[in-house]
Amino acid sequence: MKRPGPSVDRPADASCGTPPRVGLVLGAGGTVGIAWLVGALEAVRRQTGWDAASADIISGTSAGSVVGALLAARIDPATLLDMAEDPAALDRAITAATAGREHRPRSPAWPGSLALGLTGLLSSDPHRRLSSLTGFLPAGPRSTGDIRGITHAAAAHGWPTHTQLWLNTCDYKSGRRVTFGRDGAPEADLADAIAASCAVPGYYQPVDIGDRSYVDGGLWSFTNADALSGAGCDLVICLSPTSSRERGSVLDTALCGPLRAVTGQRLRRETAVLRAQGTEVLILEPSAADLGAMGINPMGISRSRQIIETAVASVGQDLTSGGCAVGLERLADVAAGAARVVAAA
């Protein structure tokens, strides 16, 4: 059966006359999601010459926040593979990131956030009611030290000035989305914002920023593509490790299929909002080969190299299909324009 190409939504009046304002959406997906994003971005670079770090807005959720922070700091996300394959290198990075940092252990409160649980149950939104159940889980026992370690080099630069870096989190009390880095968001240290975006409820400890606690932005949405609504983007590239229109193994489909379906449906609702505003949208998702490489453990690191190599090949194949010609042309235009500016400097 022929595999469907990547999804591209194009408004009827799209114009390629000027270099577009580009938004990059990097979705959640755990450790394997990070690896898939690294491979997918490399495939985009090879096909178009476009440097993802040049996006006008980089919006990350959980795994996407890790990759997005490195991109914004102009650090090749592929360097994460070194720490995935060398535990000693990861330990050194964690030590560097957490040295001198006050450790405030949390008691294993049950529930972790009663306010989140009760507020969500009263919501009329079915998704909100379901996600609010995480508030009844005990607060996660695991430190975010590993997240801080793998992003330490990026966070050391502070918030970028050449692009907008938006990191999606959830307020652990209200359950509302909070996007650090955008206008109107609370002030936050970059390292704290990255850690908060990755703080899976029940697994990682919530992250305190100011007088509030924050957890993984995937609690609101695994992609949060609609955060770019009103941002004036001409083209938005969405990389979503947790949705797919294909099936993996029988076990994979049974365990992960429902989540992928729900994530994909929500992503398409979010991007419909962008399309209605005149924005072209290119959605890239894992193939069946990717699903096989990723496996069923979202936090596994042993397959990182295989996942990256598979994503480079499968996403590259997607990008050569006819379904994403318009998005590729626009990205190629951006890359060519940037090259001319560099040559003229």
Image (cartoon, rainbow, N blue to C red):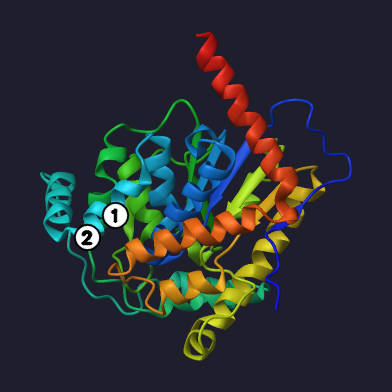
Q: Where is residue 74 in the image (x, y as percent from the top left)?
A: 38, 34
Residue found at x 47% / y 26%: 162
Report which quarter residue 338 is drawn in. Answer: top right
Q: Relative to 39, is 305 on the left or the right?
A: left
Residue found at x 63% / y 58%: 318
The residue beneath circle 1 is 81
Q: Relative to 95, is 65 on the left or the right?
A: right
Can residue 21 be seen in this snapshot? no
Crowding around mark 2 (Cα neighbors within 10 Å: few <14, some 14 to 19, many 20+) is some
156 or 80, nearer to the observer: 80
Residue 345 to residue 31: above or below: above
Q: Relative to 334, is 134 on the left or the right?
A: left
Q: Where is residue 305 in the image (x, y as percent from the top left)?
A: 33, 61
Can residue 130 be seen in this snapshot? yes
101 or 198, nearer to the observer: 198
The residue beneath circle 2 is 85
Gap between marks 1 and 2 measured at Cα? 6 Å
Q: Position of residue 78 (x, y in %)?
A: 35, 48
**Which quarter of the figure is the N terminus placed in?**
bottom right
Q: Position of residue 255 (x, y in %)?
A: 49, 86
Do the numbered discs 1 and 2 sit on residues whose CB atoms are within 8 Å?
Answer: yes
Residue found at x 41% / y 55%: 197
